[in-house]
Structure formats: structure tokens, C-alpha cells
Amino acid sequence: MKLETNPSSFLSDNIASMFWQNRKAMAIICAIAFVCSVVVSFLITPKYKATTIMFTNLNNNIGHSIISPLPDARDYMAFGEEKACEQMIQVLSSQAVMRVMMKKYDLMHYYKIAPDEPAKYSLLKYYYTEEFKFDITEYQSIEVDVEDAKPEMAAIMANGVVQVADSIYGDLLKQHAVKAFEVAKMQRDSANKEISKLEDSMTVYRKKGMMNYKDQVKELTRGYSDAIVKGSPANEKEIEDKLQPFEEYGKQYSYYYNALLDRYTIMQQLDQSYVEAKANVEKAITPFFVVEKAITPDKKYSPVRWLIVVGGTFAGLIFGFFLLLVIKRFSSENNSAL
């Protein structure tokens, strides 16, 4: 095949002219690239993509959301927040989820990873990362995509990985809720014991007729004054006897009375915490809501054969052009040397 070369015009030749002058060679190169691209496109195993879409729950503390009267109690029905989505993607991408998926679907065998392969878990991680994709959409939802050569398996694993993440995340929330409940119960029981002791101490004073220090002392003092004014020694003596416990035990009574009021206030808070923690243990809200389950795809996702063929042919055309430039340059250098 004869190539047109001209040393003096190597850099200034018109590209179109160069293509035309070497059109046969370029046609052969493009034809070879086309055939190779077609062969390669049919050698690539086709894959199907199944998609599950879900929204994350903003609040997993159902007890606080329902029971608490405070304005900071978040709506347990609300969903879709970037931070919550990022946390859920961390769970979906975690080693824990991957290992459960490995056991559930025998992924080592499915991806043909040898049991004695030293780097089998690294290979599994590679396949898991390549075939399982987790992204946050513009609507603050999570899109779970699974690609596989078998369309049924793609759908099964797209739904399965969501179920596994739900189970693992739910277990984590359950463990946290149980610990929180144990702490709330311990504090509540401890406060109950303190209140019982204080009430026992108050019973001693109540038996002495001390029910309400301020009101009783006020009324008895007024009655004592009236008895003095009226000149009634019997009434004076009776009131003095009633005032005597307040004079003798008034300080201790006030201490236990105020302490008991404080404990009652604290107990109200502990009771609410206990009820909230108990509600979280008995019933937890799923960390996300699935709005679209994956179904068996009926159309291949990859490869896009026409794109491979067009791209391969174009790449062959570019390669052929640069190959001709290299050949032309070497031919020019050889002619100059002669």
C-alpha cells in the first residue's frame, strides 16, 4: 500500500486531504475496528439493573415523638433528610450488610470466588461495590441499584439488601433502646426508693399532727393569740401542746417536706423518660419507608452495543490517523537522511 508523503509539508498538510489520500488505508482500519467492536460488544455479558427507592425516617425515637409535649419533639411520620440519607447509605455500604448478603445469597459461589482465595473478601468487596450502588436523589430519597447478569437475581438482591439493612439498623436501634430503657428504669426505681424513705420519715411527723407546716403554724398562732386575748388558759395550753411538735421538729420537717417535693418533680420527669424508653423498646419505627420495590427488569442495562461499536470504530479511526502521521514522519526523516 502506497502512502503519500511529502517531507516539506508534514505539518501543513490539510487533514481532509490526508484522509482522502489515504482513504483506503483508513477504510481498512475503520472496518477492522468496527468488526472488533461488534465482537467485543457481543462478548461482554449483558447486565440488568433493578432499582429500589426509599425515604429515610427523620426520627427513630417514637416514644419522645408521641409522648413528649415539648416543641422539639419531631414528627415521627416525617421523612427525607440529607444527614439521615447519608447515615443509611453508610449502613447499606457497610461490611456488616455485605457479610449478611454474602451468607444469604452465597455470593462467594455466585461470583465464582474460590474458597481458598487469599483475597476472597477483597474480591467480594470489589463485586459488591461494583454491582450495588447507593445514591441520594434530588428528592432526598435513596436509590438502591443492583446490576446482575440475571434479571430475577438483580431484583431479588435489590430488595434483599434493603431488608438486610433494615434488620441490622433495627437491631442497632433496639440495642440502644434497651440500654436506654434499663437506665431509665434504674433511675426511676432509685427515685422511688428515695421517695419511699422520705415518705416514711414524713409519716413520723404526720403522726405527731404535722400535716402542713406553714398553714398549721399560721392557724395555731392565730388561735393562740385569740386565746390570750380572750383569757382562756385551757385553750392556750391546748394550742401550746399542738405547737410544741412544730417548735421541736419544725426544721427537720421542713427539710423532708421540701426534699419530697423536689423528688416528686424529678419523678415526673423520670416517669416520662421511662414511658418513652418503654415505648421505644416495645415498638420501633422502621428506619426508612420503601416507596418503590425492585421488579424484575425486562430490558438490558449494559452493554449498550451500538455505543460500543460507534466508540470503537471512532477510536480506530483516531488510532489509524495518528498511525499514519507516525508513518509519514518516519518516512520524511528517512527521505531527508538520503
Image (cartoon, grey):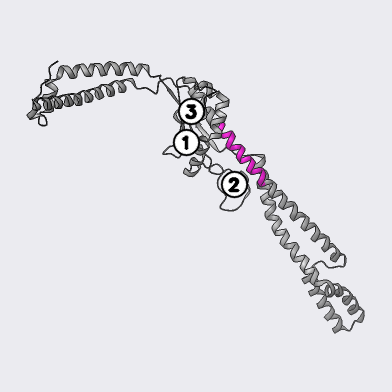
Q: Quadrant of residue 99?
A: top right
Q: Residues within 10 Å of mark 2 (few under 14, many from 20)?
A: some
The N terminus sits in image quarter: top left
Q: Are marks 2 and 1 in contact (CB under 8 Å)?
A: no
Q: Is residue 168 magenta?
A: yes
Looking at the rendered structure, the kind of residue marked 2 is: Ser
Q: Residues within 10 Å of mark 3 (few under 14, many from 20)?
A: some
Measured in 3D between alpha carbons, the distance from the residue under mark 2 to the one under mark 1, in whole angstroms, is 24 Å
Please state the extent of the stretch shown in magenta in the rendering: 164-180
User: Helix, strand or loop at disc 1?
Assistant: strand
Q: Residues within 10 Å of mark 1 (few under 14, many from 20)?
A: many
Compare marks 3 and 1 and give the one earlier in the sequence: 3
Between 274 and 179, which is closer to the camera in this rendering? Answer: 179
Tell me where residue 75 appears, x and y as whole percent: 55, 45
Looking at the rendered structure, the kind of residue marked 1 is: Ile
User: Helix, strand or loop at disc 3?
Assistant: helix
Looking at the rendered structure, the kind of residue marked 3 is: Leu
Mark 2 or 3, closer to the camera = 3
Residue drawn 79% across the image and 70% down it: 213
Residue to which mark 3 is pinned? 123
Q: Is residue 169 magenta?
A: yes
Measured in 3D between alpha carbons, the distance from the residue under mark 2 to the one under mark 3, in whole angstroms, is 44 Å
Between 213 and 317, which is closer to the camera in this rendering? Answer: 317
Side of 232 where 109 appears, left or right? left
Residue to which mark 1 is pinned? 142
User: Helix, strand or loop at disc 2?
Assistant: helix
Residue to which mark 2 is pinned? 65
